[in-house]
Image (tube, grey):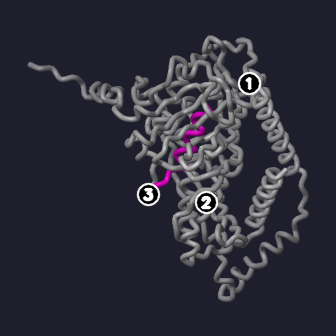
Amino acid sequence: MKLLRPIGKQLSHHLLRKPKSHRHLLLFAFSSDRDSSIPFPGGGPVGVGGPIDAGSSIRKPISLWPGMYHSPVTNALWEARSHIFEKDDTTTPLVLKTPSQSCTSVLYKFSSDYTLREQYRNPWNHIRIGKLVEDLDALAGTIAFKHCCNEDGTTRPLLLVTASVDRMVLKKPISVDTDLSIAGAVTWVDRSFMEIQLEVLQPTHESPDPSDTLALVANFTFVARDSKTGKSALVNQISPKTEKEKLLWKEADERNKKRKKKKEHNRDAEDHDADRLDALLAEGRIFCDMPALADRDSILIRDTYLENSFVCQPQQRNIHGRIFGGFLMRRAFELAFSTTYSFAGVAPHFLEVDHVDFFKPVDVGNFLRMKSCVLYTELENPAEPLINVEVVAHVTRPELRSSEVSNKFYFTFSVHPEAVKDGLRIRNVVPATEEEAKRVLERMDAESSLVSHSHN
């Protein structure tokens, strides 16, 4: 009589077999002859021995592998990161490393891999920005791990978490039919903090200029914590060697100083915006007190709200067992996109994400609520109206009757010029309460400071 294998083993074997797709999705260390505005030669534990094929890698048992639903890029990065052995020894000496030692990049061969391309295509035949942002966070985390490694490929037991993400501006449209790469390295270190700069690169057939390949720049800040005590932990310091590395270190150091000054200013700021608040609230009061006489080209912030809620599942965790920051960024982006879509009446296109702060960790089993609204619009340029969207994530614990803000995200969208030519009009958005007006002023001031800094 023929014996049958247990179903569980059959399923496990099936899930551990090598997938047939994504053979062209590669993770590799920088090469010095690669065109990039971060010209670091590669090296280090992640990516050693040639490119990592996301499709052919042998996975851990499914019960141990976090985030199985994630993109093949995220899975490949986390698997590469898992090869870094953690020593249970806090006395391991710190070493001085160069930015080039953490350089890593990812290649998406969209032009030849149909299955991969379809995972990143949205209904309008454009790339899914939220999924790309998720990959950026995964790559930044892998680079941070790589920097914390010693020469033998080991590291102390550290928790590396995303602390913040600086403003990301889309410099040109990204095609889902053309090969794409993401490249990055650690550019700045301060005790337990690291800044990783990432570049999204895509060649432009119309222009031979290498600078035209740059589509997006992102700066992620990671913080290291001791895995046992949860306290801040020191990481390897950085020693920039080339002029480019020194320039990137200086720029990152200036950004960090400005963040500290901003926090001090927010703590010490007095209520001297009474006139600006009154001006913002003037139109909102008409909506509340005399709605029949309100401007039909305006709308209250509260009438633009969308919200979604979900319980965070084990499949969404990172290698530390907490919810992956890239997953939260993707869900926030998709809610912001939907909010803009329902507000404008046409599919919007992404322009930028402003500074993102991670206030509280999100754990498996947490009940997460994301609330989104159009905070304000900028209509000075009728051909390209700007729609500024706020997404606030709340970790809600019904058993404890508590709710805390874990993240705040700010996105800017616009609509395609063809829609404006066809008569589309974007409405002005006004606050109805003082709390809403303060949020609007805070974002307007932050945007003004970023614009003035970019011109200096």
Q: Which residue is mark 3?
A: 123
Which mark, by number, is residue 233?
1
Left/right of residue 117 with respect to residue 143 in the rendered view: left
Identified at 71% across, 45% down, the residue is 166
Which stretch is magenta?
Answer: 123-141
Q: Amino acid at mark 2?
A: Ser
Q: Few, some or many C-alpha atoms within 10 Å of disc 1 (few <14, some 14-19, many ≥20)?
A: many
Does residue 138 belong to the magenta stretch?
yes
* Nearer to me, 231 or 91: 91
Instruction: Name which residue lies at 64% across and 27% down.
Output: 103
Mark 1 or 2 closer to N-term?
1
**Residue that badge 2 annotates:** 372
Q: Residue 420 falls in which quadrant of the image?
A: bottom right
Where disc 1 sits, the SS reads loop
- Res 155 visible: yes
Quarter of the image where one finds residue 47: top right
Evaluate if marks 3 and 1 touch, with contact meaning CB atoms under 8 Å apart: no
